[in-house]
Image (tube, rainbow, N blue to C red):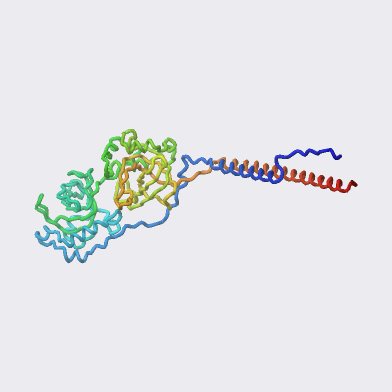
Amino acid sequence: MRGEKTIHKRSLLRGREGLRFAVLIVLALVLVIVVVGAFDKFYGKTEEAQSKPIDVDIQASIPAVKREMLTKTVKEETKTQRYQAEPEAYDHMLQMAKLIVPGTLEAMGLSATPVPVDRVRKQPDRYRGRPLAYVGELHKITSRSALKTEGFIDFAPESGDKAQKIFFTVLRPVPKEIDKEGSLVRIAGLFFKLRDFQFPFPVERTPHIVGWELTPFVESIEPVTELDPKVLAGIHDAQDRPGEIQKRPFYHLCSFAMNRPADGAWKKDIPNIQHKDWESILNADGKTPRGKQFRVLAELFDVQIKVAPPNPLGVKFWTRAWVHHPHAKTIEVHIPGRADGVWHTGDFVVFYGAFMKRHWYKAGLNDKGEHVEKVVPLLVADKLDHWRLVRSEDDFWIKLILTVITVLLIGVVAFLVIRDNGADHEVRQRLLERRKQRRAQPR
């Protein structure tokens, strides 16, 4: 009839609006899957992201010692000749000493055991310009300057043997922890010549070793499983200026890091480092005890791996890295051993480090070309790991259930859209039929 009106119920899922709504549902569900899938449990399992070792042979550069020039220039037959240090030859030896880095002397053929002093005296030309190393007690520092330090050590091949004087020249200042007579030290460098001295005491035909530095000698230590507060008390960092890393407490912390239980259960009790910890360390307020361990998850700045000189831990490499933590800012970490793998600036890494001291380092140049020094917390860790999320054991089933639900919803939405489209088409057909019938009726 003319006056009748057919009221059609408008569906929520109809036409293009329905399709858009279906797409939104699907996207929302996909998003839920991604978000839920990101809740992986990684705490305490980051070690599974260890890097595969890369077989790269790290070798130190070998200085080009002019042995022929030394043989022609150096004279030591007479007492007068042994009193003197030939300027050209001595300057060359000092230049070569500047090139000595960890691993250099070993690469040049340094003997594992000290060469007897009497043998050097009998065949000085054989050893001239070649590496020698001796361990003994520091007898006396005879001269210091901005360029070099000279002195004597007492070398005794065996316990109870008569000590023999070894004269040394080093370019780096002697560390404070051994800058006293009687300290057990190691001198490693290049043999220059036999020397005689009358002051501060008479010495004849003593080997003169020219090296980079005089280092403290620490005999092999027992594995450390508990930190000794007395050893850690030897750490000093109160001055607001660059300082040394004391070897004995450093080796103590390294040994502790290397001998933690292999099961890793102890890591669950290690707190994440916070901004307050960083402030406490830099302010040296004493609230953060030395040796306290922190878990550090941060962004990598740089990694340096170098050959290790002889040390009581027996490690062949040292790794040093700088990271940026969102709350604790820049942190420096030292690791006994080699951090294998490929490392890039910006990588996310994780380590468990024991706090040692505040440390100054040169962070580069500023706009004026001046060296910028920064003070940062120095931690000691057993290793450095790449950080990644480890999949949860329930991750597969969660994603499977969500996928099934998503498929069902998509099917339901598709069915509703198709049904509404069919109903819409049927309504249109009825309207068209009515319009035709009205036009066909006589007026």
- Identified at 74% across, 43% down, the residue is 420
- Count every numbered label the image shows and give the total: 0
- The reply to whether residue 161 is in sight is yes
Give coordinates of residue 296: x percent, y percent.
Answer: 41, 41
Q: Is residue 54 above or below residue 387?
A: below
Q: Quadrant of residue 235?
A: top left
Give coordinates of residue 147: x percent, y percent.
Answer: 20, 53
Question: Quadrant of the image for the N terminus?
Answer: top right
Between 120 and 297, the one lying in front of the other is 297
The reply, left or right, for residue 400 in relation to residue 64 is right
Give coordinates of residue 341: x percent, y percent.
Answer: 43, 52
- Identified at 28% across, 59% down, the residue is 108
- The reply to whether residue 162 is in sight is no
Give coordinates of residue 149: x percent, y percent.
Answer: 18, 51
Residue at the front extreme?
A: 443
The reply, left or right, for residue 119 in relation to residue 321 is left
Q: Quadrant of residue 408?
A: top right
Residue at the right extreme?
A: 442
Between 91 and 373, the one lying in front of the other is 373
Q: Quadrant of residue 378?
A: top left
- Identified at 37% across, 47% down, the residue is 322
